Amino acid sequence: MKKVYILGGAQTDFERNWKKEGKGMVALLKEAVADGLTGAGLSFEDVRALNREDRVACFVGNFIAEKYTEQGHLGAFLTEVDPAFYGVPSARYEAACASSSAAIDAARTSIRAGDRDVAIVVGWELMKTVDARTGGDFLGRAAYYEKEAKGIELPFPKLFGRLADETLRKYPALEEKRYMDALARIACINYANAKRNPLAQTRQWFMNFAQASARGTETNPLVGGRLAVSDCSQITDGAAVVVLASEDFVRRRGLTGRPVIKGFGHRNAPLRFDRKVAEQPDSPYLLPWTRQAVLDAYGRSGLTVADMDVFEAHDCFTSSEYAALSAFGLTPPGEEYRAVECGLIAPGGAKPVNSGGGLIGCGHPVGATGARMLLDLYKQVTGAAGGYQVPDAKNALMLNIGGTATTNYVFIVGRED
Amino acid sequence: MRNIRTVTVIGVTGTMGANVAGIFASFGDARVFCVGRDLEKVRRTVPRIVRSVKADAIAANLVPADFSMLETCVAESDLVFESVREDLALKKEIAARVAGALRADAISGTGSSGLSITEIAECYPPEKRSRFFGIHMFNPPYTLPLCELTPTVYSDRALLSWLKTYLREKLFRTVVEVRDSPAFLANRIGFQFINQALRDAERYQDNGGIDYMDAVLGSFTGRTMPPLTTADFVGLDVHQAIVNNLYAHTADWARDSFALPAFARDLIDGGRLGRKSGGGLYQVVKYENGLRRQTVYDISTGAYRDVIPYHFPFAEQMQQAIAEGDYQLAFTRLTRNQSPEARLCLAYLLRYMLYALFAAREAGGDMAAADDVMAAGFSWCPPLALYQALSSAADVPALIRERLPEVCERMDVDRALAEIRPSRYDYRRYFKSGRRME
């Protein structure tokens, strides 16, 4: 099998509100793509040259621009960014909040098959175009809208609140307070990590354990069962670009030190939350397909949890990061709180999770998140993560989920052996 | 390493006092004695402090107190922050009281935005004088992280260095050390721009005046709010205090631009201070049916009228280009357009860069300091970033010589330009199209 290298990329500042700046998706994409190519050491002229030989393609990840910005046909939309994309094959990939992981997967496949030398992944979402209630309703389409979201205010916090309920139901030995404290600590760690990330949405926000635990107050209202605002990632605008390349390309250019994608996993659980719950009693894991996707990636890479130095978990809510900890193999299922309490996942811990803030701290422009995670993995294993660098990280794993842990994508990135 | 566990904030019912108390109680995780004249009013301020950092959890850290308890609070505090109104006599009186009760190992500071820090420091006995600093934050500090830190000749340098780290790493402030100089750095640069616009509003009153200048210097020029809207938001009385201070205590080429125009003085004398007094440069007229109408003070008639929807081709072209992310095109439109409005706009931006370069040196900082203060204190495109932005479309030094000959005569522009360095700020986010995006 051919190797797939990561050349680099860029993300936009997730603090920015593009509507307030009076800018739309053209402006967003122009900035992200130009910065992403620069970050990968490429130029628009390189794109033209590669395209003359049909060796470059674009893979756009976006969940639901049709709702947020009234625009579809997003692969073709890159031609509005720069004429260098005239003639370049480009299509859009969608898997809810894992949309850009679907794009990464297609990009990775085209390199591995030898069809292309360079694959440009562009993940993006503009979400501040509408108010929170309307946006929350749009996001309901990541569940079974008709049966799980329609007419329900903020359906996703409620679904992930149910994930919290089911966690407590499945593991009777887990005390509620211990669980809720672990969730509050997860929020705190992610907010604190965001303070070291100059592109994080919440880098100026205040959060501590007392505030994360003050659920049900005016400044931390409950939004989904037991979960409060502090347990949620916040919607924002943003784009992330990451560029993959073939071994041939890397050799021809004389590039060194570029990491490779070592493993992948992709499993889909039942779409409906009820069916997920109904299916899992046979498994020690609450989200068995999430666990399986991680195992698949470990298996393909020939690596184990012991080899991983950094994790990116999909903390759209604290309850989903909690469940991810055992899926990664950091603790046995049902004992995830141990990884939180002993500092294992905190900065400086042996297995730091979401060192740049994750979805809660860095922000979650849904279609950009998978590409943002892959870019952060790239930064970590190349020592380019700046203030949130995990020292000497060699291998890193990301889990990007769509819906209620329905689509589960896992990628492992590492330095070449 | 010392720890700041207990803080006293004096003058907590004021906007800055309340907001700074919120910063100490949240990021600082300190118990904060909230001291004001009227204990009941202090109690009513507590919910405002909580909201300023969006954290109910800090309520437990806030202890209301009045001036009769001042000495008790101060004696228990690791840090005392005075934030009463900008009145030197009052600040000195409070400093003397604080000095009497302050622990030998504690730090004290004032939030003054422009009074002499040295004079206030001299109210302290020598051993405590070395532990006193100017700690000037911007409103609202939760979103504007700038903190101008001013030592005096008496300051303990090791303590200054410790305090800088505390403000930066614990309170997450963008800390800029400045000399004890008029209005420090951010306001000196910012209010030069704003007051110049106020003066030009008077000069161009027949073109529309206030709203004309705001239309020429709109959000497409690298700021959220146009300058005179900002003055209205800050309050003309506060604006006056800052520019009077600068007019009285500076002697450089920009000094005349700090003279308050007569019409602004009239508005202030008439109690029309801006948004907080229900009207100033602008006035929102509210109707019973809920409709609101934005009106503006017409300098030539002395009455409020509807805001004029100006259509300057250069501005519309820039807005269009910015909306599509074509920044270079936007700056090309600006630098090539020869209309009076485009030339006026560009002169403002060029002068802003030069004055920032100049003032940074005067106030003891470097160019990076000028960038930090304007980004973190005003949310304006900082001067070095603006230089980069304009350089994408034009030869900026040549433009400066062509458009600002009067400044070039009075300032060593070549020397200033030689200090230009790449900015650590990305200019793109500061330039807004001002258009509604659907």
Image: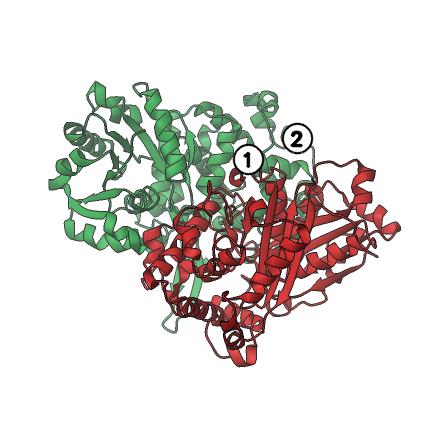
Badge 1 element: helix
* Amino acid type shown at disc 1: Pro
Image: B312 above or below B93: below
Q: Which chain is red?
A: A
Q: Chain of mark 1?
A: B
In this view, which residue lies farthest toward the left?
B68
- Dot 2 or dot 1: first in sequence order is 1
**Residue pointed to by mark 2:** B402
The image position of residue B92, as x and y in percent, is 21, 29
Residue A271 in view, yes or no: yes
Q: Which chain is green?
A: B
Q: Residue at x 34, y 37 (%)?
A: B241
Q: Is residue B52 left or right of residue A44?
A: left
Q: Nearer the viewer, residue A279 or A310?
A: A279
Per the model, the C-alpha gap separating discs 2 and 1 is 19 Å
Q: Kindly indicate whether the residue at mark 1 contacts the one at mark 2 (C-beta within 8 angstroms).
A: no
Residue B322 in view, yes or no: no
